């Protein structure tokens, strides 16, 4: 296989002695290796292999660079309290990756190849999985149109790559309740667009609104639906939930919402374990602003409480501005399952090498 590698990266020898596990943030830390597989004009993915982590070489006419033909996933591996490395609902990410590929005309990466690639990278980089309770190994599978293309059409060839980085909390203030800005100047995704796929274009659309919000002192942006700006959709990097009394609502998967794995887990746990009335439905801005509790969910953010939300007109405090009881319960349940301090009643944990 022709490798896309350009420069190898120096690898630290005694990772666990060198790493400051207490200071992890959500950022890139170069590791030992990454996985690369290629797909030719016939649409067949080759087996792929591990190569040293490093830069890659691309044609300037690559489909991903010119027309954004790319998708990705976010997965985490945890060193659990049983001192083994585990994945949380990995097959869900593999299935979503498959459908995201289909949406942007990338030959879908078979679920088995996805799982095997992720497992092999994590095994080879196991020294970089933080100690239990100190963070996780974030896994970033990507599929890109890497063949050259000039007209607007699918690229002639593709690359599936998986790299990893040890990470800590996604937001700079850890789990402190978030301060979010509602925007009605920008939309994240259009109805019938690519909002329900983990396509890279959705994230480039969110960069500018995010920059404006960060400059104003907010943590992230809440997007409204493009059709009439009456309903809330997502936070740029996560799904959104609002609790009022016993009713927990999250925007329904109507085409522009990402079907989050943590979203799905929170819905399940809220219903089965907490007995809440769980609704995937329309969620109005008014309902969100008047919620008893609000939080966002995602692999990167886990379950992050929302303390304040500002519109152009006024700032609002959600509940008493602190992390709500249900938000804490759901966060603890998910972290407990991921760290194997809580029994995995639902078969969500898959140990590495099982
Ligand atoms: C994740 O939650 O893993 C994501 O992919 C969201 C974000 C970091 C882009």
Image (cartoon, helix red, strand yellow):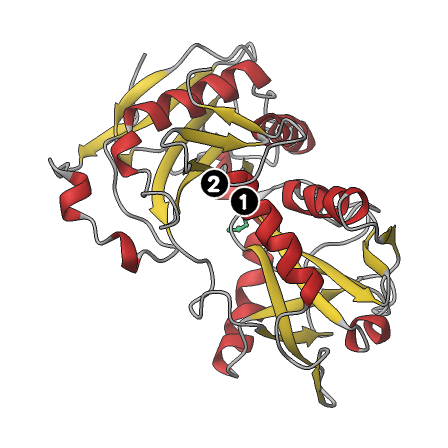
120 or 200: nearer the eye?
A: 120
The correct choice, above or below, for 134 with respect to 225 in the image is above
The residue wearing badge 2 is 339
User: What is the x, y in percent for residue 338?
Assistant: 52, 39
- Label 2 residue SS: loop
- Is the residue marked by circle 2 packed among few (<14), some (14-19), or many (20+) residues within 10 Å? many
- Location of residue 70 (image quadrant): top right
Residue occupying image coordinates x 46% and y 17% = 116
Q: Position of residue 310 (x, y in %)?
A: 68, 82
Relative to 341, does residue 248 appear above or below in the rendering? below
- Judge from the rendering whether residue 268 lies leftward or rightward of residue 214; answer left or right: right
Give the camera-side residue of 31 and 161. 31
Report the residue at 50% width, 41% height from top: 341
Check disc 1 and report the residue beneath it. Answer: 336
Q: Position of residue 153 (x, y in %)?
A: 61, 31
- Element under label 1? helix
In the image, the residue with mark 1 has its CB under 8 Å from the nearest atom of ligand 1: no
Q: Is residue 329 visible?
A: yes
- Observer able to see residue 143: no
Q: Closer to the camera, 118 or 203?
A: 118
Identify the residue shown where x is 36% and y is 32%.
Answer: 83
């Amino acid at each position: 296989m022709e490798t896309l590698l350009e420069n190898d990266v120096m690898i630290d020898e005694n990772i666990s002695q060198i790493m400051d596990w207490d200071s992890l943030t959500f950022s890139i830390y170069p590791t030992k290796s990454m996985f690369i597989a290629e797909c030719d004009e016939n649409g067949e993915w080759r087996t792929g292999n591990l190569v040293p982590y490093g830069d890659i070489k691309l044609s300037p006419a690559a489909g991903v660079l010119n027309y954004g033909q790319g998708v990705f996933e976010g997965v985490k591996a945890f060193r659990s309290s049983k001192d083994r490395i585990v994945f949380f609902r990995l097959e869900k990410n593999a299935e979503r990756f498959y459908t995201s590929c289909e949406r942007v005309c990338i030959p879908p990466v078979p679920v088995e190849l996805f799982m095997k690639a992720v497992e092999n990278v994590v095994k080879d980089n196991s020294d970089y999985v933080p100690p239990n309770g100190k963070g996780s190994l974030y896994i970033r599978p990507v599929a890109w149109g890497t063949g050259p293309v000039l007209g607007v059409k699918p690229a002639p060839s593709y690359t599936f790559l998986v790299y990893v980085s040890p990470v800590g909390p996604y937001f700079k203030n850890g789990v402190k309740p978030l301060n979010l800005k509602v925007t009605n100047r920008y939309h994240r995704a259009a109805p019938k667009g690519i909002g329900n796929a983990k396509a890279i274009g959705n994230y480039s659309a969110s960069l500018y609104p995010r920059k404006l919000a960060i400059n104003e002192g907010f943590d992230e942006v809440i997007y409204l639906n493009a059709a009439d700006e009456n309903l809330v959709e997502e936070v740029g990097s996560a799904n959104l939930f609002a609790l009022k009394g016993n009713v927990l609502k999250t925007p329904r998967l109507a085409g522009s919402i990402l079907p989050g794995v943590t979203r799905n887990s929170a819905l399940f746990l809220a219903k089965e374990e907490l007995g809440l009335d769980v609704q995937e439905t329309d969620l109005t801005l008014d309902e969100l602003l008047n919620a008893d509790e609000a939080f966002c969910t995602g692999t990167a953010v886990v379950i992050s409480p929302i303390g304040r939300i500002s519109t152009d007109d006024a700032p609002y405090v959600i509940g008493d501005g602190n992390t709500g009881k249900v938000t804490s319960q759901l966060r603890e349940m998910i972290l407990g399952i991921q760290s194997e301090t809580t029994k995995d009643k639902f078969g969500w944990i898959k140990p590495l090498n099982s």
